[in-house]
Image (cartoon, helix red, strand yellow):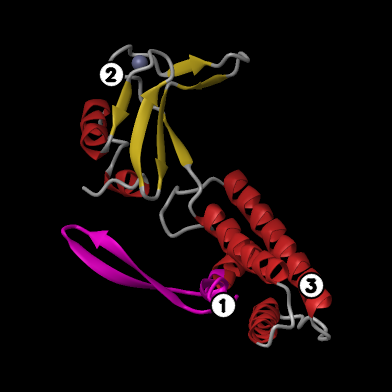
Amino acid sequence: MTDAVHDLINPWTDVVEAGRKYQAVDHDPLLVTLRTMIRSNTGGTTPGATRDADRSIMNLEALTTWERITGDVRTLTRRHTKDRPNPLLGYAIRTLAGTLDALWASHQITEPDYLHAIRRGKAWRAMIWGLLHKPREKELTEPCPYCEQAKAVTATGEIQAALVAYYQQGVTPTAQCRACGTMWVGEGQLVILGEMIGATLDTDTLHEMGVNV
Ligand SMILES: [Zn+2]
């Protein structure tokens, strides 16, 4: 259980590709990141990265996630220990995991109960991870270089920008024209699209889309 919740309550490290090198990057505990998301009203450091509406939805989702984890931790703590859950969520998780591991070591918790708790711990991590690595889309205001449409009409009659870029960490970035269906897949093609439509696909925007130029 302690392993399952490690990244929630301890700083953790991952290795990222930076140009042609690999670099270790240190991260805050995921619970700290989640709490920062809830409190954040200023969004990311990239200008124009998120609209106000997106930010408030993100904050609400982060708060809901926090509350779900808190509820789960309380339920498990009450079910398996005599302790009152610590009001500080990080401490409550650390205490719960330590107690369950000790109960398991001394055969005082059944295997299904112990495995269930570990699955919950992994689910808490996955919930926060999912919030941090949401697929995002960015509408581009320029007309499509092929069909020259700047707008596209959805099945429900809504008018949208024709060009839209989709990106998600660790996934190949793509862009699509919703008017003619042309797709650009991968960094190289997105850079070409950027050159075709001109100025607004600038370096910052490309970085934001996960394209290293
Ligand atoms: Zn098009």
- Helix, strand or loop for disc 1: helix
**Which residue bears the numbered disc 2?**
145
Image coordinates for residue 64, horizontal then vertical, percent: 71, 57
Give the Cα separation between the discs numbered 2 and 1: 48 Å
> Which disc number belongs to residue 51?
none
- Asked if ligand 1 lies within 8 A of label 2, the reply is yes
- Callout 1 crowding tier (Cα within 10 Å): few <14, some 14–19, many ≥20: some
Residue 113 x %, y %? 72, 69
Q: In the rendered image, which residue does mark 1 sit on? A: 9
Q: Which residue is drawn at 47% across and 78% down?
A: 11
The answer to whether the residue labelled 3 contacts the one labelled 2, judged by CB atoms less than 8 Å apart, is no
* Camera-side residue of 13 and 191: 13
**What amino acid type should be assigned to the residue bearing mark 2?**
Pro
Q: On screen, 114 above or below 41?
A: below
Q: Quadrant of residue 63?
A: bottom right
Q: In this view, does 103 lie above or below 198?
A: below
Query: Is residue 20 inside the magenta stretch?
Result: yes
Q: Is residue 96 above or below residue 115?
A: below
Q: Name the residue under label 3.
A: 74
Badge 2 local density, few (<14 within 10 Å), some, or many (20+)? some
Given contact means CB atoms under 8 Å apart, are the residues at marks 2 and 1 in contact? no
| Of labels 2 and 1, the one closer to you | 1
Where does the image place residue 158, in percent across and percent down from the top left?
59, 18
Q: Inspect the magenta stretch and tell me whether residue 109 lies in it.
A: no
